Image: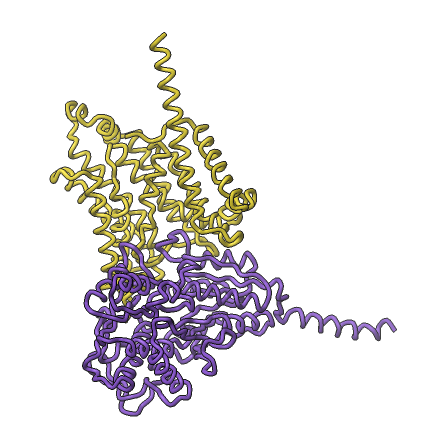
């Protein structure tokens, strides 16, 4: 009898063993490590990530471990691999590095910890068709929202509200990501300037000035406050921000207080308009919560697979916090007429009736980017090598 | 110009005073005091990895401090040390980027280039002082800004990543240009050795050579030294060149063992932090090592404060600042007491 029971006991043990080795994690003991490049309360990029990660952990249970200001200027003693080591020793089950500036560090950390799921937000190393694909890093995934839509809407709002047609873009650093976002903004502005307002594109001035990094580093980058003041002094009446922090809207608010007709469109964080609500036309923002929740859940369930996720808005309600990866929150500065026009523009995008990334489109130097009628592929947009024709400002350093 | 030359117990008292002050601050915000200090120690010394990280942070700080001992002992406020670190880093980066050579040749070439780069930047400070009559504080500070501007130009211009213009840094160097590390750790025995050798060299120069003796003499009284026949201008220039060369080595360790690329903030503020270290050490080179190591413990250990307790990342800086203020306070109290005793004896 004893021997007859033995196989059953062994089967039971193997079954239990299989369950426990599948990688399941008790959700209460789940830990998400979040590495931020800026302060977690910057009303911009880093705060958007922090709130997204908080949302995820609130949904799954467990704990959020955060470290902010991980960049060589603010934290010269701290490197990403060092932080990853610390987080893993603290029991982190999933680590999210949130800046393109962390590329080298996160690649090194992912190679050193092949069994720990990691996400490099805004990166492309898990995109098998991408130019920087790293097939060896099986634990490193990427996630990014299709902010191109948010920027097109921002560009449209700017063109609708602008009296002078002089729109300025406060750019961070120059890379493929920022080129495609500036170009998306311009496409939105151009469409609404021409099609909705019926004006000539030759009367639209769209200029970008790059400060050199995602936020101000005194003595290293150009001072964004000075740049925005220059924009206003040169006649711009709408300032669009592409940097992680809120200088554009703050300076625009100050200018408006002194009697100038200036508006601003901040970036990244849903609540950024609160810095100067009266001049805010709206804010395109990231809503990282749903994506981080989804990834965290796969880690808890033991079926995380590193992948490249470039996620568009939930067109049924792009401001739905539970479903949309990006959103656009209209600001108090937008007139009711322009608000209606903007709604119509958004509806066309949502229905797919309008694709602004469609030829004929030229690069800034006049060479062809897309022939007439051809729609840009994801790769065309992601790796945009030059700004589009009509945009004033540098495309590269060369 | 004098550093804090009190006995060891005055340093311990300063550490205690600063701990009491920081503890009061922690208590005010209802932060667990014991856990905070425990995390500082376990976060910096709690494992071989953490000890290695702490040592690696102490490397550029020790080297920068050793460089400052040379100039401070000669009576020179070498605020230009930051620029000299940067110049060393730029020169080493140039070698790392431009020369394709095996590690055994490349690393010594980078060290040599960093040494010369820092020396050149020190020479500029010296020439401005000797030939142009520009005080080394102003000359050095100006050259700090020039060095930062140069790095930003290189990083965003000729040395930028392909298709990118960002102040985030150059492409990482080829691995041949990385200081070798102990397997599984970030600790580089070469970097640690360089820092210890530099300190030993400074000790040797000031305790065993006529050059060091004359520098000390100039530092104590330049006019008398000149009247005794010491060519003070030449010695001042040499001290700034030598100090700059040593500082340049700190830049080499930053690019070759920490960042593996050139970033605009490559000096890491170690030059300015080194000034505090040297003042606390009373210009005594052997004391630079423990004080710099303690500062590094705070820098590395305080990361845990944010990770484990959710405290603000700047609290480590508050602790360092309080420590320095406590030393100043205790040193001033000691001097005041000595003066009173002297005064009483004179009256008797």
Q: Quadrant of residue B169?
A: bottom left
Q: Is A308 placed left or right of B70 in the picture?
A: right
Residue B171's place in the image compared with B199, above or below, is below
Q: What is the drawing colour of chain A?
A: purple
Q: Is residue A375 visible?
A: yes
Q: Is B315 placed left or right of A61 in the picture?
A: left
Q: What is the drawing colour of chain B?
A: yellow
Farthest-out residue, left: B131
The image shows residue A241 at horizontal and vertical percentages of: 32, 68
Looking at the rendered structure, the number of numbered marks drawn on it comes to 0
The image shows residue A117 at horizontal and vertical percentages of: 52, 68
Which residue lies at the image location 38% right of the left edge and 76% below the top edge? A150
The image shows residue A154 at horizontal and vertical percentages of: 34, 75
Toward the viewer: B65 or A205? A205
Q: Is residue A224 visible?
A: no
Which residue lies at the image location 54% right of the left edge and 44% below the top edge? B38
Q: Is B327 placed left or right of A358 in the picture?
A: right
Q: Quadrant of residue B212?
A: top left
């Amino acid at each position: 009898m004893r021997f007859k029971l033995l196989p059953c006991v062994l089967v039971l043990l193997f079954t239990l063993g299989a369950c426990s080795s599948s990688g399941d994690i008790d959700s209460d003991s789940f830990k998400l490590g979040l590495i931020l490049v800026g302060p977690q309360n910057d009303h911009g990029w880093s705060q958007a990530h922090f709130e997204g990660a908080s949302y995820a952990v609130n949904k799954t249970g467990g704990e959020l471990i955060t470290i902010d200001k991980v960049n060589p200027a603010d934290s010269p003693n701290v490197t990403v691999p060092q932080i990853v080591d610390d987080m893993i020793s603290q029991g982190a089950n999933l680590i999210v590095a949130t800046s393109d500036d962390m590329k080298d560090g996160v690649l090194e950390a992912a190679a050193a910890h092949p069994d720990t799921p990691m996400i490099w937000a805004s990166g492309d190393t898990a995109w098998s068709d991408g130019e920087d694909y790293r097939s060896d890093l099986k634990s490193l995934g990427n996630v990014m929202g299709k902010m191109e839509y948010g920027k097109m809407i921002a560009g449209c709002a700017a063109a609708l509200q602008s009296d002078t047609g002089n729109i300025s873009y406060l750019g961070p650093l120059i890379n493929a990501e920022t080129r495609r976002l500036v170009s998306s903004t311009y496409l939105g502005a151009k469409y609404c300037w021409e099609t909705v307002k019926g004006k000539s594109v030759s009367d639209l001035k769209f200029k970008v000035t790059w400060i050199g990094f995602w936020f101000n580093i005194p003595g290293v980058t150009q001072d964004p406050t000075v740049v925005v003041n220059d924009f206003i002094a040169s006649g711009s009446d709408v300032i669009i921000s592409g940097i992680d922090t809120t200088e554009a809207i703050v300076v625009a608010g100050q200018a408006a207080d002194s009697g100038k007709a200036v508006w601003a469109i901040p970036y990244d964080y849903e609540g950024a308009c609160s810095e100067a609500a009266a001049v805010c036309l709206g804010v395109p923002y990231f809503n990282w919560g749903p994506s981080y929740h989804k990834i965290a859940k796969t880690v808890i369930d033991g079926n995380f697979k590193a992948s490249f996720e470039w996620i568009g808005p939930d067109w049924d309600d792009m401001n739905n916090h539970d479903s949309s990866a990006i959103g656009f929150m209209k600001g108090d500065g937008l007139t009711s007429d322009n608000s209606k026009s903007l709604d119509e523009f958004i509806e066309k995008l949502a229905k797919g009736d309008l694709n602004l990334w469609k030829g004929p489109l030229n690069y800034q130097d006049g060479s062809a980017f897309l022939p007439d009628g051809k729609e840009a592929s994801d790769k065309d947009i992601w790796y945009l090598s030059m700004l589009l024709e009509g945009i004033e400002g540098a495309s590269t350093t060369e | 110009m004098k550093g804090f030359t009190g006995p060891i117990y005055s340093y311990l008292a300063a550490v205690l005073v600063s701990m009491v002050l920081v503890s009061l601050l922690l208590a005010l915000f209802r932060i667990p005091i014991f856990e905070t200090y425990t995390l500082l120690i376990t976060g910096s010394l709690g494992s071989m990895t953490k000890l290695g990280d702490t040592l690696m942070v102490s490397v550029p700080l020790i080297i920068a401090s050793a460089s400052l001992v040379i100039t401070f002992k000669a009576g020179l406020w070498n605020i230009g040390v930051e620029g000299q670190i940067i110049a060393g880093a730029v020169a080493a980066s140039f070698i790392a980027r431009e020369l394709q050579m095996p590690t055994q040749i490349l690393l010594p070439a980078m060290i040599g280039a960093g040494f010369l780069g820092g020396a050149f930047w020190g020479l500029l400070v010296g020439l401005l002082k000797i030939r142009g009559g520009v005080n080394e504080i102003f000359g050095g500070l100006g050259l700090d800004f020039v060095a930062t501007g140069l790095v930003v130009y290189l990083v965003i211009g000729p040395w930028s990543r392909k298709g990118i213009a960002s102040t985030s840094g150059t492409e990482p160097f080829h691995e041949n240009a990385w200081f070798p590390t102990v397997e599984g750790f970030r600790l580089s025995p070469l970097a640690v050795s360089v820092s210890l050798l530099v300190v030993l060299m400074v000790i040797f120069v000031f305790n065993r050579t006529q050059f060091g003796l004359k520098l000390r003499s100039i530092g104590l009284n330049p006019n008398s030294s000149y009247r005794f026949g010491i060519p003070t201008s030449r010695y001042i220039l040499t001290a700034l060149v030598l100090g700059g060369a040593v500082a340049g080595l700190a830049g080499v360790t930053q690019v070759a063992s920490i960042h593996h690329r050139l970033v605009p903030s490559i000096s890491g503020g170690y030059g300015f932090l080194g000034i505090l270290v040297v003042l606390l050490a009373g210009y005594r080179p052997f004391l630079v090592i423990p004080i710099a190591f303690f500062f590094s413990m705070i820098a590395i250990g305080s990361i845990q404060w944010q990770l484990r307790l959710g405290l603000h990342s700047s609290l480590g800086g508050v602790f360092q600042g309080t420590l320095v203020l406590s030393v100043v306070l205790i040193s001033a109290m000691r001097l005041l007491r000595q003066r009173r005793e002297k005064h009483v004896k004179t009256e008797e």
